[in-house]
Amino acid sequence: MTRERKNLVGEIFFYILIAIIAIYLLFPFYWAAISALKTEAELVRTPATFFPQNPTLQNFRAVLSNPDFLRGMLNSLIVAGFTTLLSLLVGAFAGYALGKLRFRGRTPSLYLILAMTMFPQVAVLAGLFQVINAVKDIAWLNIPTMVFLILIYMLFTLPFTTWVLTSFFKGLPDSLLQAAQVDGATFTQTFWHVLLPLTAPALVTTGLLAFIGAWNEYLFALTFTLQDPGSRTVPVAISQLSGRIARQEPVGEIMAGALIITVPLVILVLIFQNRIVDGLTAGAVKG
Amino acid sequence: MAVASQKAKGNKGGRSELAKAEERTAFWLLFPTLLLLLLIGIYPLGQVFYLSLTNKRFASAQETQFIGLSNYANLLGMTLRELPVETDDAGNPELDENGNRQYVNDRLFLRRLDTERAFDTVSTFNLFGTRYVLGATNADFLKSIWDTAVFAVSAVFLETVLGLIIALALARKFFGRGLMRTAMLIPWAIITVVSSLIWEWMFKSDRSGFFNAFFEQLGVSSGNTVWLVNPALQMPSIIAIDVWKTTPFMALLLLAGLATIPKELYEAAEVDGASKIRQFFSVTLPLLVPTLAVALIFRTLDSLRVFDLFQIVFGESRYSMATFAQFQLVASKDMGLSAASSVIIFFIILVFAILYMRSLGVDND
């Protein structure tokens, strides 16, 4: 066999491998999509069809007119949105202090925050449950469940945003800071007018990752909305979806709902993909 | 002279004044973060430690009592016994039609033991011709630890191997590479609850499910495999779901690690006449070890905490450590027991967290 011939065979195997990987990664997504387009009768047909015979949008219509699902979407947007904004704001303060200022207790603070990023959330579940019930018993405060969720989600978003922003601030040249100091700017002025504009790209990436984390969260949402179904976020809503048209488990509607809540996220991820990959690998790979 | 010394003094005073101001600023910038973490992390954790020593029940009028380590004794109580052989009236071992010895039923045997707490079977196994039974006062919890460990080790191992293959394939420049890198983010971007629901549907127990339809058409099964119900198939199925969801993340980490290996090393190896396989073992793998170590520990940490996947796919039929603790809290309303199981989970994960921090290292400059 000549060398060229051998190369060609290698090439073909390589592309077959790539194709297998692509199918593996995308197939479940395809299966969800065709299931969402099938009629109820076709969904229970055996054997399952690999293409929808009479594609229909009725599952999408059904799920989009399901008040529980819509409520869940809205609740998730509110909870994930506020969690992200608060974590970015508070995390940027802390990240600036840890990345750029000299003070006693810096290293212990860094260790504490890194430790918090891998905190097992189930470890505080019973404690948070206790605290929330105690605060809720104070009737005149009347705090909505979603406020608790926003605060609790900071448990995993805040250490993460702080950690990433710390390393980002550390990477900014000190000369910028000194120049601002020479011009007579206070620390606060330097922070708002020099450093924050420079961190905008890092804020977008970190914010997106924090948003995905909060949008994804299930353990706390499931546990704390148990007595308050109106506050259910979308992961809880979709896992407990009861059908409007289907007699049994509304698989078609669940798949349609799955696509509806996934597609916007996937589009966002695809737009920011390079930054996300950098953000995900920032902590783990030392260049 | 006087002026100069005053000036020097003033300068010194000014600098330390500046350093003090910097420290004050740092304190106020860190204050909101530390306060929040205290309120939502450290205080509730303290509460959990305290609750674990009580018999507090949620939504109950029963008075809470301090019961010491009794919850822990319940969760971790174990016994290992030799299972006696079934004997006939003459004292000879009873044999079945194949000539095998008949053992006493393990459940009944454990029930008949005269102990303070009742034991349930965790598992039975044979060793050197003797049959043993492992009993526990809370078989569900011990099983959840075992299942979570099996899940974490197998899933992390498989996704590392697959992730490495994908990363190596994608490290090459080829037509459609950008598209592939994009496709890899899709499993990662899907909400875990949603991907669990999709896979649960694909694993449906009749031929309206993908896997049953597929394997039936291949002729390797009858098309009625109960993937998520049969105890022997439950773990492989759930591991497959997790591997699909997290392999892309692993591949992305490893791809970034591969990018840090200098090209000159490969050129030098090429000149020395090293084969591709030799290059992989002598250059790629050793230089990838730091990335691999971090990724491995990080993923192990993550899979030990698994909740969403087990909750959606198995509900109460099989627990992970986290679903066990959550179930004890919301369904059994047993806060004390739930808290004690949380404390145990906390310490198991702490060990891995310390390993992770060691391998990552905090910059002390």
Image (spheres, grey):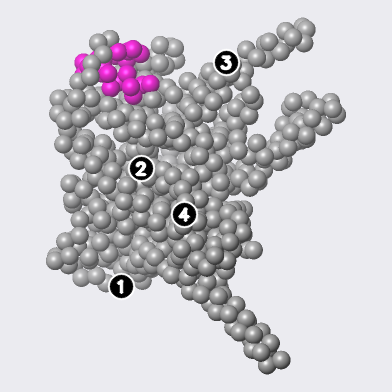
Quadrant in the picture for the N terminus of chain A:
top right
Where is A40 relative to B122, above or below? above
Q: Look at mark 4 in the image and give the residue it sits on.
A: A196
Mark found first going from the N terminus, 4 or 2: 4
Other-residue count near label 2 (Cα within 10 Å), few / some / many at <14 / 14–19 / ≥20: many
For the point 47% across and 54% down, the residue is A196
Distance between the alpha carbons at the discs numbered 3 and 1: 64 Å
Could you confirm whether marks 3 and 1 are on the same chain? no
In depth, the one of B261 and B241 nearer the eye is B261
Could you confirm whether marks 2 and 1 are on the same chain? no
> Which SS class for mark 2?
helix
Q: Look at mark 1 in the image and give the residue it sits on.
A: B66
Distance between the alpha carbons at the discs numbered 4 and 1: 51 Å
For the point 71% across and 35% down, the residue is B284
In depth, the one of B1 and B354 nearer the eye is B1
The extreme right residue here reads B272
Of labels 2 and 1, the one closer to you: 2
In depth, the one of A231 and B212 nearer the eye is A231
Q: Look at mark 2 in the image and give the residue it sits on.
A: A216
Q: Look at mark 3 in the image and give the residue it sits on.
A: A16
Other-residue count near label 4 (Cα within 10 Å), few / some / many at <14 / 14–19 / ≥20: some
Mark found first going from the N terminus, 3 or 2: 3
